[in-house]
Image (cartoon, helix red, strand yellow):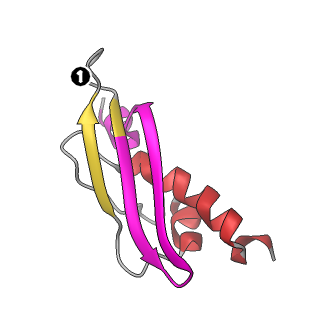
């Protein structure tokens, strides 16, 4: 099954990186969120650490990264100039 491959799990991690907020914390997706299955498929042992920095062009876009441990090693994913998903939902 594709979801058990490291490549697919890394792709799923990319969806999870959009849950990094402007203040740098990671919000774990809820079962009702559209990316919840992708987050679960990554297989993080615990919620990943998050890092973010507001974009210099606009205060709403961020450069973000997540770093977390799985059974196949450390997973990191970077997002450049993204809008946090929860920020979009709150407005």
Query: Which image quarter holds the N terminus?
Result: bottom right
Residue 88 within the magenta-colored segment of the rendering: yes
Q: Secondary structure at mark 1?
A: loop
| Up/down of 91 relative to 71, above or below | above
State the image coordinates of residue 31 (x, y, percent, origin top left): 47, 66
Residue in the picture at 37% in, 33% down: 88
The residues colored magenta run: 64-90
Disc 1 packing (10 Å; few <14; some 14–19; many ≥20): few
User: Mark 1 — residue?
Assistant: 59
Residue in the picture at 48% in, 66% down: 75
Q: Nearer the viewer, residue 85 or 12?
A: 12
User: Image check: 87 left or right of 81?
Assistant: left
Residue 19 within the magenta-colored segment of the rendering: no
Residue in the picture at 51% in, 65% down: 39
Identity of the residue furthest to the top in this view? 57
Number of on-image labels: 1
| Up/down of 59 relative to 23, above or below | above
């Amino acid at each position: 099954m594709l979801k058990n491959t490291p490549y697919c799990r890394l792709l799923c991690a990319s969806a999870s990186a959009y849950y990094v907020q402007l203040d740098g914390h990671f919000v774990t997706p809820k079962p009702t969120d559209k990316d919840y299955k992708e987050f679960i498929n990554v297989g993080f042992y615990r919620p990943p650490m998050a890092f973010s920095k507001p974009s210099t062009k606009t205060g709403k876009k961020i450069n973000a990264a997540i770093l977390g441990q799985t059974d196949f090693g450390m997973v990191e994913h970077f997002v450049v100039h993204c809008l946090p998903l929860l920020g979009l939902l709150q407005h």
